[in-house]
Image (cartoon, rainbow, N blue to C red):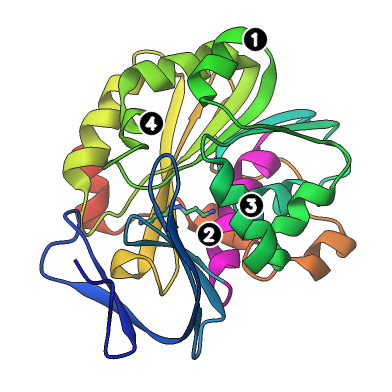
Amino acid sequence: MDLIIDGWFHERGELWPGQAMSLQVKKVLYHGRSKFQDVLVFESTNHGNVLVLDGVIQVTERDEFAYQEMMAHIPLFAHPNPEKVLVIGGGDGGILREIAKRPGVKEIYICEIDGDVIEYSKKYLPSLAVGYDDPRVTVKVMDGAIFMDENQDNFDVIITDSSDPIGPASVLFETPFYNAMHKSLRDGGIVCTQGENVWLHLDIIKPLMDSIKQTYTDVEYAYTTIPTYPSGQIGFIIAGKNSGSSKAPRREPTKEQVDSLKYYSSEIHEAAFVLPAFAKKGIFGA
Ligand code: JFQ
């Protein structure tokens, strides 16, 4: 399928039938195949540089902060004292950039399976890949499940910044992966994972959340708004290992952090868990 027609990139996908996000292309910066997927990076007319994997928009420079900030700071501000953090996926580095804003964090690990995503993000998405420059970061180009198996009882927060459940990331939406994260968490730890969209994917979200309730103590759902993801929003599954609820932040951002944040605030942390009635019913029942 042609991704770019008449100078416009169209994001068509099995997971959002009958709709497509389109962005106008100024210049293709890279297009090739990694060991795992099709990788496209283009400069858009109005959204900065854009990373696309297997035809699906991963980030645009214009709105990526709405996702990365919320995905990182909801679990980090919900946890009383996160010192050791693991990121699975997230090869663009944006989540690392956000975690690095927290001085209390001592060690940050990232497991990205596709080294090409890291390489091309460093080249074309420097404002995200700056996350790799933090000295607390250790990079593992490997399968996150294997790394977690080798590192049990180890992390305060695990963030799974994955692509959609079609292709290389599909295992990340299954119960065994959540069991592996649970084993790799310290007591009191929190996981935050890419949780798709309530307009499109209640059939994926509900059974997954129901099943992980058998392992995790606190299973909650929050969302952010982001114009270039399907239907303009994306959710997060947030689950704890005896953490208590993550709905209220346990600390406020410092003045310096507030200055560096464009989307996250203590107010929006709490608001993000308030779901429209249909979504609340669809995920948690009546
Ligand atoms: C950004 N760091 C990773 N994650 C992007 N449909 C996903 C990409 C595909 C989308 C949902 C989010």
Among numbered discs 2 and 1, the one appearing first in the sequence: 2
Q: Is residue 9 visible?
A: yes
Viewer-side label of 4, 1: 4
Q: CA separation, marks 4 and 2?
A: 18 Å
Q: Tell me the amino acid under the disc marked 4.
A: Leu
Give the secondary structure at mark 2: helix
Q: Is residue 69 visible?
A: no
The secondary element bearing badge 1 is classed as: loop
Q: Residues within 10 Å of mark 2 (few under 14, many from 20)?
A: many
Distance from label 3 to label 1 (Cα)? 30 Å
Reading the image, the residue beneath label 3 is 119
- Which is nearer the N-term, disc 3 or disc 4? 3
Disc 1 residue type? Asp
Mark earlier in primary sequence (3, 1)? 3
Q: Which residue lies at the image location 70% right of the left edge and 57% below the top edge?
A: 129
1 or 98: nearer the viewer:
1
In the image, ligand 1 is in what quadrant? bottom left
Give the CA separation, mark 3 to mark 4: 22 Å
Label 3 to label 2, Cα distance in Å?
21 Å
| Residue at image coords 33%, 50% | 196
- First reached walking from the N terminus: tag 3 or tag 2: 2
Q: Nearer the viewer, residue 168 or 264?
A: 168
Residue 199 vertical position relative to residue 49 in the rendered view, above or below: above
Q: Residues in magenta? A: 61-79
Q: What amino acid is labelled 2 in the image?
A: Tyr
- Magenta region includes residue 233: no
Mark number for residue 67? 2
Mark 1 surroundings: few (<14), some (14-19) or many (≥20) residues within 10 A: some
Give the residue pinned by disc 4: 172
Q: Residues within 10 Å of mark 3 (few under 14, many from 20)?
A: some
For the residue with label 3, is its CB less than 8 Å from the closest atom of ligand 1? no
Q: Residue at x 59, y 18 (%)?
A: 147
